[in-house]
Image (cartoon, rainbow, N blue to C red):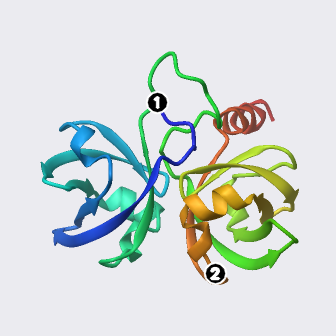
Amino acid sequence: MFTGIIETIGTVKSLHTDGASLHIDVLAEFTQELKIDQSVAHNGVCLTVVSIADKSYSVTAIKETLDKSSLSSLSEGDFVNLERGMRLGDRLDGHIVQGHVDQTANCTAVHEENGSWRFTFSYDATLGNITIEKGSITINGVSLTVVDSGRDFFSVAIIPYTYKHTTFSALKVGDVVNLEFDVIGKYVARLTQLSS
């Protein structure tokens, strides 16, 4: 379980394929504090630490994860948003984030708005996921509030702190991002489908 409040930005040190799986080595400032079997969200994808070596650690993404997320497009040197699992008893500063990506989206617009930025994303609405204005959305692991919502698009506003301390500063039109929709909204949508 995560909050969507990014702790640090990591760097992809190396990538290795093994059949349909991808092993990812990540350089991160909190590597010394990690342990084997710990969960870390990488651009919003919960992955298990499988090995630790000096300042880097390794995780493995299986085919299911690669099919539903943008992790398969990572390259050496890419930056990733990182968050360790939430501690019981800590404040929930973002919203409840599972680290289970629902689908990807494309960045369709970036506008600077006199001290903040508005990012717009389009996604495949046929998969049944929805956004609502003032609702929560997780983009590449970052907990955000939806400011505009349509059938297959939405926008979020990014404050300077978030812009500087996440990978949003490098995000551009055409980039693919990972989306995790609000878990409560997903349950409500599913219950509505079952009762119709």
Whether label 1 touches label 2, CB < 8 Å: no
Q: Quadrant of residue 15?
A: bottom left
Q: Nearer the viewer, residue 159 or 36?
A: 159
The residue that mark 1 highlights is: 86
Q: Residues within 10 Å of mark 1 (few under 14, many from 20)?
A: some
Query: Can you say whether 171 is above or below 60 in the image?
Result: below
Q: Residue at x 25, y 70 (%)?
A: 13
Helix, strand or loop for disc 2: loop
Tell me: 118 left or right of 190.
right
Residue 96, how many percent across, how many down? 60, 33
Q: Residues within 10 Å of mark 2 (few under 14, many from 20)?
A: some
Tell me: 166 left or right of 1.
right
* Callout 2 amino acid: Lys
Residue 52, how many percent across, how many down? 15, 49
Q: Residue at x 74, y 39 (%)?
A: 189
* Callout count: 2
Helix, strand or loop for disc 1: loop
Tell me: 10 left or right of 122.
left
Q: Quadrant location of the C terminus?
A: top right
The residue that mark 2 highlights is: 172
Residue 130, how many percent across, how many down? 75, 52
Rounded to the nearest whole Å, what is the CA distance between mark 1 and mark 2? 29 Å
Of the numbered discs 1 and 2, the one sitting upstream in the chain is 1
Q: Residue at x 14, y 48 (%)?
A: 51
Seen as rendered, the residue at the extreme bottom is 174
Q: Nearer the viewer, residue 103 or 92?
A: 92
Residue 178, how many percent across, how many down? 55, 61
Q: Nearer the viewer, residue 64 or 149?
A: 149
* Callout 1 amino acid: Met
Q: Which mark is residue 2?
A: none
